[in-house]
Amino acid sequence: MSITVQSFGIKEALNKLHIKEINHGSAYGINSFGEGELLNSYSPVDGELIGKVTATTKEEYQKIMASAEEAFTTWRIMPAPQRGEIVRQFGEKLRELKEPLGKLVSYEMGKSYQEGLGEVQEMIDICDFAVGLSRQLHGLTMHSERPGHRMYEQYHPLGIVGIISAFNFPVAVWAWNTALAWICGDVCIWKPSEKAPLCGVACQNIIAEILEKNNLPAGISCLINGDYKVGEFMTSDKRIPLVSATGSIRMGKIVAQAVAARLGKSLLELGGNNAIIVTPDADIKMTVIGAVFGAVGTAGQRCTSTRRLIIHESIYDTVKNALVDAYQQIRIGNPLDENNHVGPLIDKDAVNMYQKALEKAKSEGGKTVVEGAVLSGEGYQSGCYVKPAIVEAKNEFEIVQEETFAPILYLLKYSGEVENAIAIQNGVAQGLSSAIMTNNLREAERFLSAAGSDCGIANVNIGTSGAEIGGAFGGEKETGGGRESGSDAWKIYMRRQTNTINYTTELPLAQGIKFDL
Ligand code: NAD
């Protein structure tokens, strides 16, 4: 791998993360790999080539899978709290390396340095959660219908968990999956986004050092690199009982079919089309902060970014004007400079999609409230910086029905009761995150009721983005139905087994069936 970057303290950060040589197509410890084509990692911040990573070939993949299979035989029988101890050490190392890793996330992906640090903090949080969980992987006991019998259910590790992740959370999503999968006794094989491969290498280096120090097999954590073709190695591989895939709905539909064709399990975390309902009882100041952060944070490239604001007609103009004022204050520029609010989009393709979406919104009858633009000149050389835009629109516009991964906020008006706003909010194919801003208890409870929001996440007086790891995270409908992170999301990483034990000298059959010899 070659490193070309000299500025922003990036080189120092890469050094601290041990990103030095070409050796990045493989599980740690299998150093002879590196036959595949080179993937270039360009920073959207300044357009510089940060480094090159070797894509994993099919032959290398087979060797990596062999190392994962072997590692599983050791790891699955290690007591869960001991596996938790490894995850604890991983979390400690992340605390130590929070700044360089946060910086790399910011530089390779383009989110603000604060958000890069926040992403590493999410990794630390899920490690803490997983460590505690490693002492409480509980099952249930049931009363048997047969005398002298006992029934219970227990959870065992699944095997090799495949993780496919998106560019926008290049490290946290892997950690959400892997910290839980590890304490459950699974080993993991990860394909990070081809748009942020160095983040994958950095994480792999951190965990590999810990495994080596504890004399554990390297195959507990495997890394493969490349685009969708490398992802397909995993989706078609019967040795992988669970594929956890985060990304676009288009990708999720392909992955789900490939995994289902071999009767594997998939955990899908796909696109959102998230809305905030603003009722006449909303606190306008809170609404504006929540909506602006939700719409422009990470340059609109969060799965939970706020894309639609559904505002009651009685306060529509007040909210619109407050948003216009707030948007004038947004500073766009280098995300490593903490004075800036908004960094670049991931690449020029994303910029094209942003431009096309704005044109389409106009052609469908949308009215621009805050004009978008692609920025150029000093500080914007990468060509990936755009102005956050606001468009007055209708929910039925085709473009409003889609997720555009860019800072475009659609304003939608509702009249009458909150049910009308909920119908608009639910009137899209995706079902990830939703929110209501109101001080009216009745409206809030109607939004949260069975007839309310149909999303996996429904918030009151909080925006749509910025979930905590303690709750299960994921969405319904075309968002894929998967749940990761907190609560009982760990169960998907395990197989359930029901055990019945007979401690008598008789052999009674269930349902009273007689079978005498
Ligand atoms: P993407 O779908 O282009 O790629 C995601 C990953 O899937 C990449 O690693 C890619 O190489 C891989 N991939 C693509 N096609 C594949 C195939 N046929 N087989 C196997 N792997 C394949 O998404 P992206 O542009 O990186 O990320 C943005 C999308 O991710 C948005 O839609 C966003 O909403 C979504 N996302 C969702 C969540 C969530 O938790 N719901 C979180 C983050 C991002």
Image (spheres, rainbow, N blue to C red):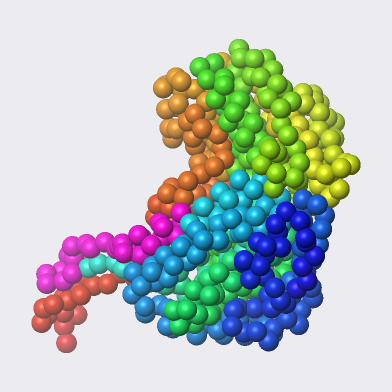
Q: At 68% from the left edge and 38% from the top edge, which residue is drawn?
A: 339
Q: Residue furthest right?
A: 377
Residue 292 point in image, percent of width and height: 64, 31
The quadrant of the rendering that contains the N terminus is: bottom right
**Position of residue 116 in the picture relative to residue 92 (left or right):** right
Magenta stretch bounds:
125-150
Q: Relative to 160, does residue 379 appear above or below in the rendering?
A: above
Q: At 69% from the left edge and 17% from the top edge, which residue is drawn?
A: 321
Q: Relative to 154, does residue 220 appear above or below in the rendering?
A: below
Q: Relative to 83, does residue 371 appear above or below in the rendering?
A: above
Could you say which is closer to the camera, residue 141 or residue 62? 62
Is residue 357 magenta-colored? no
Could you say which is closer to the camera, residue 58 or residue 399? 58
The quadrant of the rendering that contains the C terminus is: bottom left
Q: Quadrant of residue 294?
A: top right
Residue 414 point in image, percent of width and height: 62, 20
Q: At 52% from the left edge and 20% from the top edge, which residue is drawn?
A: 283
Residue 444 point in image, percent of width and height: 45, 26
